[in-house]
Amino acid sequence: MNTTVATTGTEGKTWGGGTDPLKASYGKMMMWFFIVSDALTFSAFLAAYGFSRFKFIDSWPIADEVFTHVPFFHGNYPMIYVAFMTFVLIMSSVTMVLAVDAGHHMNQKKVTWYMFLTVIGGLIFVGSQAWEWNTFIKGEYGAVKTKGGNILQFGEYVNEDGEQKFKRVAIADFAKAAHGDRVQHESKNGLWYETEGALPEYTIDEVYNGLAAHENVLIRNQIINDEGEKTVLTRAESLKQLKANGTLVVHGANLKVNEYGSPLFADFFFFITGFHGFHVFSGVVINIIIFFNVIIGTYERRKNYEMVEKVGLYWHFVDLVWVFVFTFFYLV
Amino acid sequence: MAHEHKLEIFRGLWKFKSNIQKIWGVLAFLTFITLIEVGLGIYKPEMFMHTWMTPFEGGFLATLGNIFFSPLIYMKPLNFIFIVLTIVKAYYITWDFMHMRDETKALRRMVVWTGVFLICYLVFILLQEAGYIEGVYTNGYIKRDF
């Protein structure tokens, strides 16, 4: 009964089966679809970041003042280290695409070598990010949180090349440590059902006394003025605001407080760079797996290196996301 | 397996002899753009720090004009430059590193337009609403500072 076998006359045509639609293999196309959906996730995060930033557009922290550190160097180098991280990631994208190219030529040695370099690049990037987190969490100058949840920072005007410049001053440099009679409340020495976190290094009174004793130290609040800089209060106003509204000495940043300004800035920083860092980390793990597969010759036997191409797509995507994170977190 | 690569970028202005050469060329270009971005980010030239246009006043046409020129009216030129440069970078990463240039037109459009439309929608909604909330904070009777 030949008639039960359907011959539709479409064999070899696009939808007849046996051909790759869009001339892409199944795996590659699925990787593309995954990338599209992941791109939407990341853009949702970045758009949410934009949402919070627009909400507080006149008091958002200035990234140049937050990320100014470079490992092993002292001083003020805004952007430099992030630019380095960006370059590392782009460079590891290049070694990845070179690995893909070597795969097309079935050159096992070269693929191994380039995959190795890609993994190293990824590790340098993740390490740098960990360092950046660490610096951000530790903080630098310290600040005072007000009753309204705003941040007051300290600094003084110094002459630099004939120009008056506002330089930040660390709380530890001027606060007057007094004998504190306040000790940390632990469940063992007080109410057994209650406990509290570590006390801040200084109390508001100590900071206030220090401020009163140092004539040139001023307070800067978060409101951005017409020149695009944070507003510096007068001496009298500084003393008044600290006395009336200061509630907590903050050092560094976490999910609740942030010495650089709005806590939302820290929240989004941890969330978005953390999510991206997790992508880089999983990318490194996948790259390592592929690396060992290349070494043991899996793809030689399979007679194609398409797997390298597929992880390559993912790896480039991670780079692509970083380009956007870099712009919206550090530049804009 | 035959792998055909299109070996020219900038619409044929820059041609390469091999795929490997093209990769290094694209790297040079991306590095160049990153350097421009970092330079602008550090020095912040005064001319890019204030918007070049003020909003149009008036009726319907003014509103249309404000929408049409919104990147120039409501955004610092510096930020506008950053965003444009970022999209340029994204284009070359996708087109040359991810080999989108060598895929079929249909696959290209499927990936790019889906993303572009949905992201534009998302960004529009969120920024629009955030602008509204900022207005409430600024002009309303919510006590904010101190």
Image (cartoon, coloured by chain):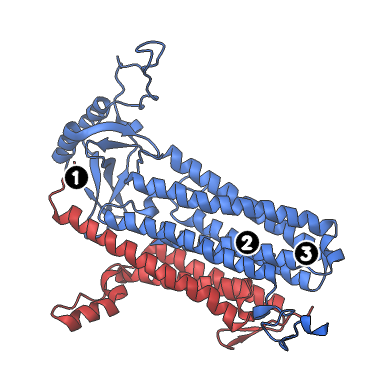
Earlier-in-chain disc, 3 versus 2:
3
Amino acid identity at mark 2: Trp
Q: Is residue A73 visible?
A: no
Nearest to the eye among marks 3 and 2: give it: 2
What colour is chain A?
blue
Question: Mark 1: which secondary structure?
Answer: loop
> Residue at coordinates 50% horizontally, 41% vertically from top-left?
A134
In percent of width and height, residue A293 lies at: 80, 56
Q: Which residue is mark 3?
A: A111
Toward the front, the furthest residue is A1
Q: Amino acid at mark 1?
A: Asp
Q: Are marks 3 and 1 on the same chain?
A: no
Q: Quadrant of residue A26?
A: bottom right
Instruction: Using the numbered discs, state the Cα–Cα distance from disc 1 to disc 2 in whole angstroms.
Output: 44 Å
Subunit that carries the residue with mark 2: A
Mark 2: few, some, or many residues within 10 Å (few <14, many ≥20)? Answer: many
Dot 1 surroundings within 10 Å: few (below 14), some, or many (20 or more)?
Answer: some
Q: Which residue is mark 2?
A: A315
Q: Residue at x 32, y 43 (%)?
A: A168
